[in-house]
Amino acid sequence: MGSKRDSNSAVKKVFEWIRKQSKKMKILLAVMAMLFSLVALKLTAKYHNHFFVASESIHAAGILVLIYKLTTKKTCSGLSLKSQELTAIYLAVRVVCSFNLEGDIHTLLDFATFLFTAWVIFMIRFKLKSTYIKELDNFPIYYMVVPCAILAMLINPRTAQIYFSHVLWAFCVYLEAVSVMPQLRMMQNAKMIEPFTAHYVFALGMARFLACAHWIIQ
């Protein structure tokens, strides 16, 4: 019992020390923690493809949290429609690319997540339109789509597939990386975070980390 109490007190002291640090120091610590995690995953994990499957599964779980909120709370306040639309775009492109390459577990997970996202968009646009705060969701979509499309044409993977497939795959990767920006902007404008929205954003963060771990380690 004594050792558990000592370890708990040590953890509390660490968190208290982190809370007292400046914003720049917290960012530095977060970056160092991510790099340490990537190195640990590289050294311990044998099947790196599992990271990508876990990323897609966590994203799907995050969307299910949103669906639960929309069906039980009957409100979409705090949710960014534009983030959902960007998510639907890159998921649709990735499903097309996956079908062209080979149908596997990734295709199934992405297609399921795309359907969930499409349902969320339908609910926000039509069923729960009165609770959608459009004024706070003011991040232009073309700020994300156009630069990602240009970057995809300039920088894309070199494989045996045709050039158009390279561009599509690069586009969905770049757009996925920035699709959460409208949601973060809306949270900043609202100056508050609802619990279900926070859970969804946390799930996105975990999914992005695992996806990055997969690509970097590969």
Image (tube, rainbow, N blue to C red):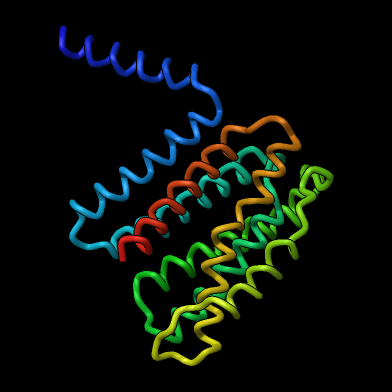
Instruction: Kindly identify the residue that appears in the image at 69 percent across and 60 percent down.
Output: 122
| Residue at the limit of the structure toward the right, as seen here | 135
Instruction: Kindly identify the residue that appears in the image at 50 percent across and 35 percent down.
Output: 27
Q: Position of residue 66 (x, y in %)?
A: 57, 47
Q: Position of residue 117 (x, y in %)?
A: 59, 60
Nearest the eye: 158 or 57 = 158
Say above or below: 205 vs 104.
Answer: above
Locate residue 23: give its quadrant.
Answer: top right
Q: Position of residue 18 (x, y in %)?
A: 44, 22
Nearest the eye: 162 or 84 = 162
Q: How many marks?
A: 0
Q: Is residue 126 visible?
A: no
Instruction: Kindly identify the residue that appears in the image at 41 percent across and 58 percent down.
Output: 211
Quadrant in which the N terminus is drawn: top left
Q: Is residue 101 visible?
A: yes
Quadrant in which the C terminus is drawn: bottom left
Say above or below: 136 vs 46.
Answer: above
Locate residue 89: give its quadrant.
Answer: bottom right
Nearest the eye: 152 or 51 = 152
Q: Position of residue 86 (x, y in %)?
A: 65, 62
Side of 107 where 41 appears, left or right: left
Side of 154 where 49 appears, left or right: left
Say above or below: 143 vs 3.
Answer: below
| Residue at the limit of the structure toward the top, as seen here | 2
Nearest the eye: 88 or 153 = 153
Instruction: Kindly identify the residue that appears in the image at 48 percent across and 80 percent down.
Output: 97
